[in-house]
Amino acid sequence: MRKISILILILSFVGFAGAQTDLIRIEDDTELKTSIKEHSALLKSIKSNFIQEKHLSMLEEVVISKGKFLFKKEDNIRWEYDTPFEYTIIVSEGKFLIDNEGKISEFDINSNPMFKQISNIIVMAVSGDFVDNNQFNVEFFQNSKFYLAKLQAVNEQVSQMLSGIYIYFDKESLNVVQVKFLEPGDDFTLIKFHEYQQNIDLTNSDFQLN
Amino acid sequence: MSLFSCSPSYLKNYTVLNNSDLSIPTIFSGKLSKSLYKANLKVMGNELSGVCLIKKVNETEFRLVFMSEIGMKYFDIGIDYKNEKPEFNIYYFVSVLDRGEVKQILMNDIAALLNEYGNNSKTLVFKHNNSGDIALKNSFDFNNYYSFRYSGKNKIKNLKWNSKPEGKSEIYISDYQNSLPSYVLINNAKYSIGFSLKLIK
């Protein structure tokens, strides 16, 4: 069973790497930008499971965590990890709520500029709402499966933390299927969404801690 | 601190055991190849949480990466024990922690956690005069580290030392799982630094 899991993991990396190597830059991105903007404007909510892979290149290690993700416009997020630890972050009504294995904490979103920045970046990445965002330079690529938007922060403080943000869109649905946060050096965090649903009803209680 | 300086009160009521044939435990007792811990770091009232990956990368060197749950690294350090004092490689240290003595204490305290006290250290075994509990004094890098065993078990429950550059640090281990410490608390009272690790796998 363990061998099968490792094989699946290796094959998924090979598949993912293969999927990236044939990416071609889109020179005229006007039409794609319009489509992404329209798709983003129609997006009201997202409910999805996710697998997060933290790739530590020098250690040749991948730390995998899993959970559930909810998003409701304008800026409500529930990021809930259930494996291998329990941890939930909720961003709603100008506040961060954190449930760290039963320990609850709450603070104002404006009290921590770094957290606010991260929250904004996550919302922007998962909703595809970056086309007119002058905080990032964007280049578009494509292959048979994905559109890829490569974002680079203009702000030096952000670029010291994140050397790039890669957002992968399904070519047919324009749903965001993967987001890759690259750090200076070769480490990165890859978030893969699956069982993705959009524009379903999410209530305020979904953005509260139970 | 000199190797021959007077011991603090850590070993009051303990007597040195000469010619002890006791197998000498350390916190990880050479069993760590790679482990993932849920981690919390408190520094002067501020708290960072996440996961901590500890990996033995070769015979003498460990790498420790502490990162948030969402994957952002707080620090990434290597500690090599091949020489008479631990050598640190800092691969990354987030700016909010990269200040003054906090960083230094944190690194030295983590070095004490992972130290297996090889050929570069000298170990003395002590026995408590009343309870018979065993304590160990490891002299390494011109400092003394006092380990206290669980009563009747060859496992460390507590490690105390004078931290660098100052203050006293302690490590508490409340449980072991498959020979690995499953809950660890590293504490430096003077700088209000507390780093707790809960074993995931």
Image (cartoon, coloured by chain):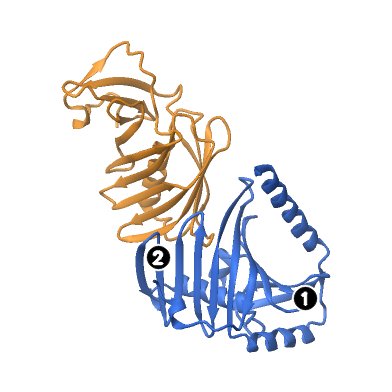
Chain colours: A blue, B orange
In the current view of this chain or complex, which residue is farthest to the top? B19
Q: Identify the residue shown where x is 26% and y is 21%.
A: B126
Displayed quadrant of residue A166 = bottom right
Q: Where is residue B178 in the image (x, y as percent from the top left)?
A: 46, 35
Residue under disc 2 on the same chain as residue under disc 1: yes
Q: Residues within 10 Å of mark 1 (few under 14, many from 20)?
A: some
Label 1, on which residue? A171
Q: Identify the residue shown where x is 70% and y is 46%.
A: A4
Q: Is mark 1 on a helix, strand or loop?
A: loop
In the drawing, does residue B4 fall left or right of residue A32?
A: left
In the current view of this chain or complex, which residue is farthest to the front? A1
Q: How crowded is mark 2: few (under 14 residues within 10 Å), some or many (20 or more)?
A: some
Residue A131 drawn above or below residue B37: below
What number of labels is visible?
2
Label 2, on which residue? A99
Amino acid type, label 2:
Asp
Residue A53 visible in the snapshot: yes
In the drawing, does residue B1 fall left or right of residue B72?
A: left
Q: Identify the residue shown where x is 71% and y is 51%.
A: A8
Q: Which of B135 and A81 is in front in this view?
A: A81
Q: Where is residue A110 in the image (x, y as percent from the top left)?
A: 41, 78
Q: Position of residue A82 (x, y in %)?
A: 50, 60
Chain for numbered disc 1:
A
Displayed quadrant of residue A159 = bottom right
Label whose residue precedes the other's in the sequence (2 or 1):
2
Chain for numbered disc 2:
A
Query: Quadrant where the N terminus of chain B lies?
Result: top left
Residue A166 visible in the snapshot: no
Displayed quadrant of residue B111 = top left
Amino acid type, label 1:
Lys
In the drawing, does residue B197 fall left or right of residue A4?
A: left
